[in-house]
Image (cartoon, helix red, strand yellow):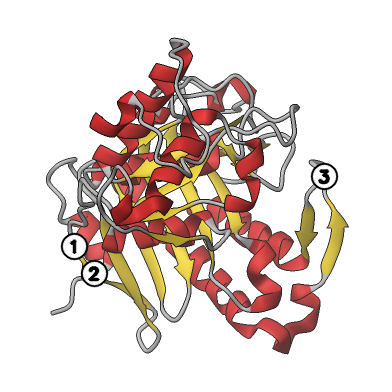
Amino acid sequence: MRNSLNRFVAARKHPEPDRDLIALLDHVQKACRAIAKLAAQGALRTPATHNLGVNIRGEEQMLLDVLANSTMMRCGEESGQLCGMLSEEMTDPYRIPQWRQCGRYLLVFDPLDGSSNIDVDMTVGTIFSILRAPEGVTEPGIAAFLQPGTQQAAAGYAIYGPATMLVMSLGSGVNAFTLDADSGSFILTHPDLRIKETAREFAINVANRRFWEPPVRRYVDECIEGAAGPRGIDFNMRWVASLVAEAHRILIRGGVFLYPHDSKDPKKSGGLRLIYEANPMAMLVEQAGGAASTGRRRILDISPNELHQRIPVVLGAKLEVERLVRYHEAYDRGEDLIFEAPLFHSRSLFRSI
């Protein structure tokens, strides 16, 4: 008998099954199935791909963003296990109405990550994180959601590609489930995913190189030099502009993803939202044996100071992330190093790191 997501979660011993959490996850997967159906119709549903203009945070918003958000909101309410929700599409937290059953969990999510890819029919996804509401809180305000990533009860994402998959962690490993279109069930297909410590593949938007800090430029330049450079191996470079797609590739076949701090927009402290993008992905990557950092600090240790806080993100192969952290540490110490593209293979202490 094939192992469905529901059966898998219910049979877990570490952590022990939590009936409320199982019920909530059942509604999360229900929402992901519905969003997958919406995304799959593409141009057949022209209004769904219509650009609504710029949202309150100055980002382009598609109608499919709104539809995905309302789908997750509806399923979250129906679960009866939540007392509040927070989404990329909402300015403030949403409290479960009094006429609904109220639970002890908080759901935070990005309903449609990578929506800029919709018009070219590329991969998009949904990211979610489940937090426990503070003791005694039934009407959560902003403070209830400002929890470090270490407090996540569960995290995961759905990826809507050639197959729809749900990748999830309950704090003890990472498992991936593929949607069986015939039965409507998510079936365990990739148990206990592990990320190799080293990598030969990296993902970053090189068009922003001129805005990067020197440690990031140094790392990418060394990768681009390949076998002729200090790393002594050839790397492949990828960039999909979808966090779900980038993280999924790393979980399945390894690599490292960088969305570093840059000077392109001085008002932004980073590119990705801490609570509903960076934290859930950091939990998944660490549970799979990888590492997740801002370049200077472990992501899961950061206590958010605002709901939509942005941070730099480096995640994936453990040894690659650690190398980038060392580069940042050396730079912050003020070491006099050449970080520009080494056209003449100038030497630096990094060649022995």
Q: Residues within 10 Å of mark 1 (few under 14, many from 20)?
A: few
Q: Which residue is mark 3?
A: 58
Residue 149, numbered circle? none
- Judge by depth and name the residue closer to the eye, 334 or 276: 334
Instruction: Characterize the local packing of mark 2: few (<14), some (14-19) or many (20 or more) Cα atoms within 10 angstroms.
Output: many
Q: Quadrant of the C terminus?
A: top left
Residue 173 coordinates in the image, percent (x, y): 21, 47
Residue 154 appears in the rendering: no
Mark 1 residue element: loop
Q: Residue at x 71, y 75 (%)?
A: 119
Residue placed most toward the observer, 353 or 270 = 353
In percent of width and height, residue 289 lies at 21, 43
Mark sitting earlier along the chain (2/3): 3
Marking on residue 188: 2
Q: Residue at x 21, y 57 (%)?
A: 193
Q: Are circles 2 and 3 on residues that touch, CB within 8 Å?
A: no
Residue 56 in the figure: left or right of residue 218: right
Q: Quadrant of residue 35?
A: bottom right
Left or right, 241 with respect to 160, comes to right
Q: Which label is found at residue 191? A: 1
Quadrant of image for the N terminus: bottom left
Comparing marks 2 and 3, which lies closer to the viewer?
Answer: 3
| Residue at (32% x, 29% y) in the render | 350
Secondary structure beneath dot 2 equals strand
Within 10 Å of the Cα at label 3, are there few (<14), some (14-19), or many (20+) other Cα atoms? Answer: few
> Seen from this angle, which residue lies furthest top?
333
